[in-house]
Image: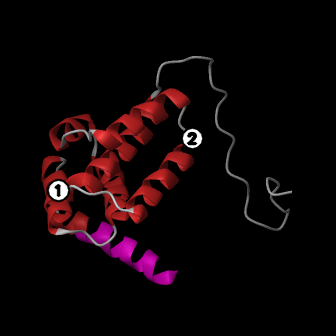
Amino acid sequence: GAGRASPWGSPPPPAPPPAAPSRPVGAEDREALLIVRAMIAAARADGALDAEERAAIAGQLDRAGLEAEARELVLAEFANPAPLEALAAEIGDPVLAAQVYAACVLAVGEPSPGERAWLDALARRTGLGAATVAAIEGRLAAEAGRG
């Protein structure tokens, strides 16, 4: 079966904690949601969202396993992306800032000038230094090159 790890394969990921029914959007969901919202805003920075960008965002949505309610929020953002200032204000720590930045780089692929300006502004507002940004982009480029 697809869900079972073979005894000699890699260990299965740890099971997520059981979810309480109809809980408010939890901290992990909020972070996942924030990442997806930032990806949408980055991809829309040049005024267009192409098929590749949509696919990257849809993939992130699936991986995040967000509740239906959270997905609705995200779909609304496609039409009306959150402003960079609002997203940056929700990013409270450098680890999350790096995660969000990396997700945005993945979402836009080869950035247009508008997207590049948006990414630069995100890095500035969330306190990511040039060295950190270069490291993130270098790592992503290396990973993309492997495929």
- Seen from the viewer's position, the closer of residues 13 and 56 is 56
Q: Residue at x 33, y 38 (%)?
A: 77
Numbered disc 1: secondary structure: helix
Residue type at numbered disc 2 = Gly
Residue 66 is inside the magenta segment? no
The residue that mark 2 highlights is 65
Residue 114: image location, x then y, percent: 15, 62
Residue 130 occupies which quadrant of the picture?
Answer: bottom left
Residue 41: image location, x then y, percent: 27, 48
Badge 2: residue crowd in 10 Å (few <14, some 14–19, many ≥20): few
Residue type at numbered disc 1 = Trp
In the image, 6: left or right of 74?
A: right
| Image height of 25 relative to 28, above or below | above
Residue 109: image location, x then y, percent: 34, 69
Q: Residue at x 46, y 25 (%)?
A: 25
Q: Residue at x 50, y 46 (%)?
A: 61
Residue 80 occupies which quadrant of the picture?
Answer: top left
Q: Which residues are magenta?
A: 134-147
| Image height of 69 relative to 147, above or below | above
Mark earlier in primary sequence (1, 2): 2
- Residue 86 can be seen in this image: yes
Badge 1: residue crowd in 10 Å (few <14, some 14–19, many ≥20): many
Residue 23: image location, x then y, percent: 54, 18
Residue 135 is inside the magenta segment? yes
Numbered disc 2: secondary structure: loop
The residue that mark 1 highlights is 118
